[in-house]
Image (cartoon, grey):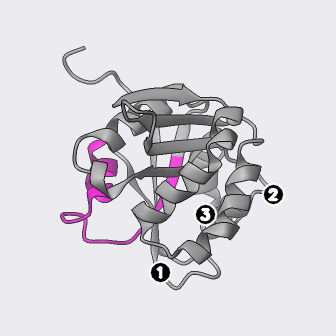
Amino acid sequence: MRLVPWKPDDLARRLDDVVAVYGEAMGYRPELMEARRGIIATHVRRAGFRAVATLTTDGQLAGFGYGYVSGSGQWWHDQVRSALTEEQRNRWLKDCFEVVELHVRPAAQGHGVGARQLRTLLAMAPGSTTLLSTPEADERKSRAWRLYRSFEFVDVLREFRFPGDERAFAVLGRDLPLRPPSGE
């Protein structure tokens, strides 16, 4: 497998594959994915958009990740901002790169693909901080949680509920830039 940076047009061209990986990784039914397709298509036009993809030797999409500069008027940003204190807003949102999606096909999970995608995405990210949200889970059992903790993400909000989703989420953050991995 090889990791490649993607420009907005690259992601847009592979939108069907991106939506399929997203649905598989999240365990969503296919009929729920059509709305997601439209949302992702608009994200590629956001300021500071950065994306990475992991491709198999035959060009199949094994995983992807993307984000952009978080700002007022964006749904996720505004939801999170409303739950933060003024001090937290100043700390986390003033110059923030939002990790919007980071997914790996289940068959490719457990092989470091997500870590390589996240490291590469954050190395390309503008900003002095980064935020993401992930469903609340047992941190010892969840691959996503173990990944984010290994990258030194800290709790910003816990048990946060986005409108329209009954699940509780955590909003996690860390400072940028990343330090190079040990041994480099």
Q: Decide: marks 3, 1 in contact (CB < 8 A)?
A: no
Q: Measured from the top left, where is residue 11 in percent x and y?
A: 63, 40
Say which residue label 1 marks.
167
Rounded to the nearest angstrom, the CA distance separating label 3 from label 1 is 22 Å
Say which residue label 2 marks.
73
The residue furthest top is 184
48 to the left or right of 144: right
What kind of residue is marked 3?
Thr
Residue 114 is drawn in which quadrant? top left
What kind of residue is marked 1?
Arg
Magenta-colored span: 131-151
Lower position in the chain sequence, tag 3 or tag 2: 2
Pointer 1 local density, CA inside 10 Å: few below 14, some 14–19, many at least 20: few
- Residue closer to the observer: 62 or 157: 62
Q: Secondary structure at mark 2?
A: loop
71 to the left or right of 122: right
